[in-house]
Amino acid sequence: MLRCKDNYLEIRVGDKELLLDFDEVSNIRDNFIYTILNDDNPVLYPIEIRRGNAYMRLHFTRDLDAPTLIVNGVHMHRMSSDIGPLRDANYKVRAARVRRGHIVLDVCTGLGYTTIASLHHGAERVYTVEVSREVLAIAQLNPWSAKLANSKVKIILADASKLVERLPDNTFDRIIHDPPRFSMAGELYSRDFYRELFRVLKPGGILFHYTGEPLRSRGHGHGPIVRGVIQRLQYVGFVRVRYDDRAQGVVAVKPRE
């Protein structure tokens, strides 16, 4: 809640309250999301983390339906005049055809929007894997991620490329794989990783693999990254492999036995 009070701006977040004078207000940066830290001496603090060469923060504009995460200058969600992070997540879940009672593996939690959308579509249980403590810390401060705190959600802090090797066969009805771009996490685009996803997916199960449209030439089909994803998925045994234009990713099916 915001209101002016005796030449101060009063900010209230939950049970925390802070008064800012107008000089302090002028230091608030556009497109940032802030939280109030410290109960005894409250401070308005941007939701951001710096560690070594890594920098990540929440980014929000009034045109978006929810904040996105920026990692080293790269947006982790699609952003356009008609698609924000929540709609983007919903498109991915629809492409995976998540239904009531499904057990879902969500690879790369991020802010948790895909997990939350899976619950909205009826998933009975979602196992969501994130390699970065910092990303999960930011999600914990993001109001739009609050529904991750659900008994049907299991958040796993791990490297997905290694964790999946320890998962049992034929476990998941659906897998939603939403990795960073290829240059940031090439192991999550590898044939070996896809083979493990195939193994843990139930027969008849569906994988959705977000790729975006990197290096796509107008009128000349998909770029080499998307073509490579399709070829490797087919190689490890997936069938009916196709690109979903609305969700901007590859859909693949594990054959029924």
Image (cartoon, helix red, strand yellow):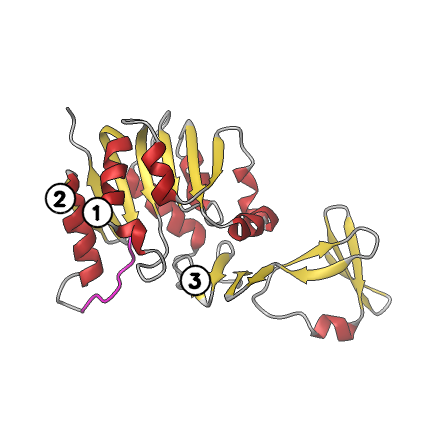
Image-quadrant location for residue 185? bottom left
Label 1 close to label 2 by CB (< 8 Å): yes
- Residue 40, above or below 147: below
Residue type for callout 2: Tyr
Q: Is residue 216 magenta?
A: yes
Residue shown at 49% from the left, 54% from the top: 65
Q: Gap in Å between the C-alphas at discs 1 and 3? A: 26 Å
The magenta span reads 210-217
Image-quadrant location for residue 233? top left
User: Is residue 240 something one can see in this rendering?
Assistant: no
Q: Gap in Å between the C-alphas at discs 3 and 2? A: 31 Å
Quarter in which the C terminus is drawn: top left
Q: Mark 3 falls on what kind of element?
A: strand
Residue type for callout 1: Arg
Q: Mark 2 falls on what kind of element?
A: helix
Relative horizontal placement of residue 108, taking residue 24 as reference (left or right): left
- Residue 120, above or below 47: above
**Mark 3 sits on what residue?**
75
Image-quadrant location for residue 1? bottom right
Q: Nearer the viewer, residue 186 or 128?
A: 186
* Mark found first going from the N terminus, 1 or 3: 3
Marker disc for residue 191: 1
User: Is residue 233 something one can see in this rendering?
Assistant: yes
Marker disc for residue 235: 2
Q: Main secondary structure of the magenta part?
A: loop
